[in-house]
Image (cartoon, coloured by chain):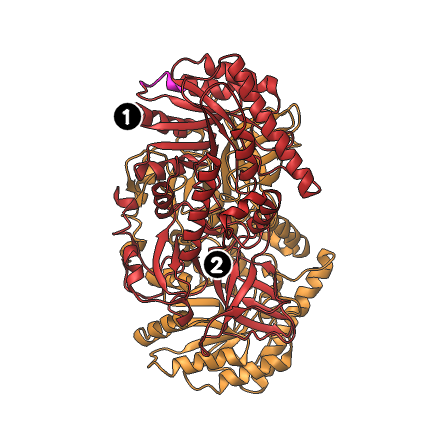
Chain colours: A orange, B red
Amino acid sequence: MPDALDFETFVLSGLIKGVPPGVAPFPLAETGTRGWNLLREDLPLPAAVLKVSAIEHNDRWMQQFLHLSGAVIAPHGKTTMSPALFQRQLAHGAWAMTVATVQQVQVCRAMGMKRIVLANQLIGRQAIRYVMEELSAHADLEFYCLVDSVPGVAMLRDAANQFRLLAPINLLLEGGTMGGRTGCRDLASALDVARAAASAGPVLRLRGVEGFEGLIGGKTPEETESGVSAFLDFLAGIAEACVAENLFASGAIILSAGGSAYYDMVVERFSSERLGRETLVLTRSGCYLTHDSVHYRHYFDRMQERAPSLQRLGEGLRPALEVWAYVQSRPEAIKAVCTMGQRDVSRDIDMPVPLLWYRPSTGGSPVCVPDGHRVTGLNDQHAHLAVPAESPLRVGDMVGFGVSHPCTTFDKWQVLYLVDDAYGVTGAIRTFF
Amino acid sequence: MPDALDFETFVLSGLIKGVPPGVAPFPLAETGTRGWNLLREDLPLPAAVLKVSAIEHNDRWMQQFLHLSGAVIAPHGKTTMSPALFQRQLAHGAWAMTVATVQQVQVCRAMGMKRIVLANQLIGRQAIRYVMEELSAHADLEFYCLVDSVPGVAMLRDAANQFRLLAPINLLLEGGTMGGRTGCRDLASALDVARAAASAGPVLRLRGVEGFEGLIGGKTPEETESGVSAFLDFLAGIAEACVAENLFASGAIILSAGGSAYYDMVVERFSSERLGRETLVLTRSGCYLTHDSVHYRHYFDRMQERAPSLQRLGEGLRPALEVWAYVQSRPEAIKAVCTMGQRDVSRDIDMPVPLLWYRPSTGGSPVCVPDGHRVTGLNDQHAHLAVPAESPLRVGDMVGFGVSHPCTTFDKWQVLYLVDDAYGVTGAIRTFF
């Protein structure tokens, strides 16, 4: 592994947010040997922590889910962008990692990964050049990316023809929904793209059909799920039409969808699809490993309602990610301000939720934040909390917040701590955003 | 300067977002020698760029503004967290740097800064310990922080008494508004805090009064400005009451307010305050240097309306910060999707605005994006644009976006490029978030 990813030697110092100020620089790998504990105030706050027991539990849960379903997973690495977590996911059976950008592809390549899914269009001179150079130098690289337009296919074809590729570019044809994000909106345009890919010569190989159902909305959960079902049918229909025209390259046909909210529906629908050829059902949840306390928790509860068979897997996913901050001000009886802002925690879907509080001078264990405390706003470096007038929170107390949407909390931190259930620090992970 | 801040040796590689993929690692200081140009697709997109001519213009504008007003500035470093920009600001006369957290204090200390304003409460065992250690080791360190509660003063006093400080902690008493953020809400509670500070012994020195007016809202600009005026009067009144009780330590009394929207009102009000002692009017705008294309542009236009004398300073502030992305999909006639998401650009106040577009295969210069193009949403790694059906944008075109709120764009990047007016890359800066 190149120096830049070498966890043994990556050096932490107080210039990095979350690292104790003034400590002599030390290798990240030694973090767990320091005997630090969050509750003993060994860390500056805000700090982001991952509960190891929850990650291990979620990891086992997903392995069981996939085992029962017969699908494989290429977890979306953009969620955590943490090589240490990628290594765990690959060691525990992930088929590949999924990423969103070429910088993220490079992190995977620097780790030595040989199978990578870029769940995005490959666009731009530098990004295309880099991938072509990698495919020209490494016959064992299995690289997938999305296409949703004929010009996009032509750009890849023209670029590939300027190189002597040792390995082809594997394409997944992207289907989308009207008003949605990327992806062909109808069968006719999807087939145009598929035909362009199939006729582009051996450097491009059309390997399957892909979509992202996570942005489909409806007025009720049932309406949304109906939309998701229709979209999965649409993707399967594209695959059927491509089979009918013999547009897929050799190898298993890949059917891929699945953010972190509907993967049960994805594996159920795609596993029952009969294309007359070997088919690989590829899910891509990025958030299952850490889960969260609001957004995906809500979706997971709903998943368990609509798929009672999931009960067989025992306890569901647990939230692993928390951000802790101090109460820095109680300027009004009904207000507290904490040392954590939108630079430290997600706010794009919901505000963070205060879960636990702890008074360092008193000791004991953190206790649940009483009802009536909620985050009403985040500035860059401050959280505004509405609190009951009788709130126990005082200046200097610690508050642990759950997050909604792990992706946009991970990307606020270069270093997150791994903690045991007593908030003892057992290690740290680095991110690459 | 310690290694971690040594720009000569800090090494860029494609593992860092915005750096061309696959290039051999190279020192950041050499970026400007590469002959790169954004429009020639030498950079991967998204990439964040700073127009040097705009920064130089804004720098001069603020110097003139301060010269005419007699106030000083401690620019809020949390905006950019870029030592290279801090150095520019200090070299051009900034009285100090302002920061929001102790990690940010450390970046300033690592640069050798001797006067630092922590515009926040100093809270937590690690943060307090670090500052006390610095003050115990460096008699020349002039450190300021805020207090808004008697317990907060007591925590600092107790901690300071455990050290042998060579330099005192300078305190600014924070006033706030009902419903606002931190700060004492009324004169009585402010005086309680001031008395606690004044009686805490020589380790704490009450040096002035501070507030942040940037969150005050109203139904109309006039109503907001009326609120700001009342708040500035409130702060001045706290100072008068502290003078009457002789609560300030020796030295000039500091009157400080001023985000990036109302600094004209701050210097006007505070400069006319007569406390019977030497007074220093301290502004703290963080955003003037790069300005922006929406939020602060709007406030600046309003400032020029209410303070016509600013016309004497010539052309006002220019937006220096842009994020560029590719069009990756045109899935519907009225939609474009670009390779830029909420991990790359601000969205907390307004969506980014498409300013310029450019087709690399055609050459020439970027042109203004026609009317009718706007960002309707940002996912983690994608921008959704509503476009007219006749929009010229095609897959592979480049689009330059202006931002609203520079702070939350800077913190998305470890490296931003400095460019000339033709988008030639003249250098790069590093950030510490």
**What's under tag 2, amino acid-wise?**
Glu
Assign the N terminus of chain A to one quadrant of the image: bottom left
Q: Residues within 10 Å of mark 1 (few under 14, many from 20)?
A: some
Q: Is residue A47 visible?
A: no
- Residue at image location 28% in from the left, 36% down from the top: A24
- Residue at image location 57% in from the left, 36% down from the top: B265
Quick check: is B285 in the magenta stretch? no
**What's under tag 1, amino acid-wise?**
Ala
Element marked by disc 1: helix
Q: Which residues, given as a range, are shown in magenta? A: B159-164
Q: Residues within 10 Å of mark 2 (few under 14, many from 20)?
A: many
Q: Are marks 2 and 1 in contact (CB under 8 Å)?
A: no
Quick check: is B161 in the magenta stretch? yes
Element marked by disc 2: strand
Marked residue nearer the N-terminal end (2 or 1): 1
Chain under numbered label 1: B
Q: Is residue A77 visible?
A: yes
For residue B115, above or below residue B25:
above
Along the viewing direction, whichever of B272 and A177 lies nearer the viewer: B272
Q: Which residue was labeled with disc 2?
A: B322
Residue B165: horizontal and vertical position, in percent?
A: 32, 20
- Residue at image location 46% in from the left, 34% down from the top: B70
Camera-side mark, 2 or 1: 2
Label annotation for residue B199: none
Chain under numbered label 2: B
The answer to which image quadrant residue B2 occupies is: top left
Q: CA distance from mark 2 to mark 1?
A: 42 Å
Residue A425: horizontal and vertical position, in percent?
A: 39, 37
Label annotation for residue B137: 1
Residue A221: horizontal and vertical position, in percent?
A: 71, 56
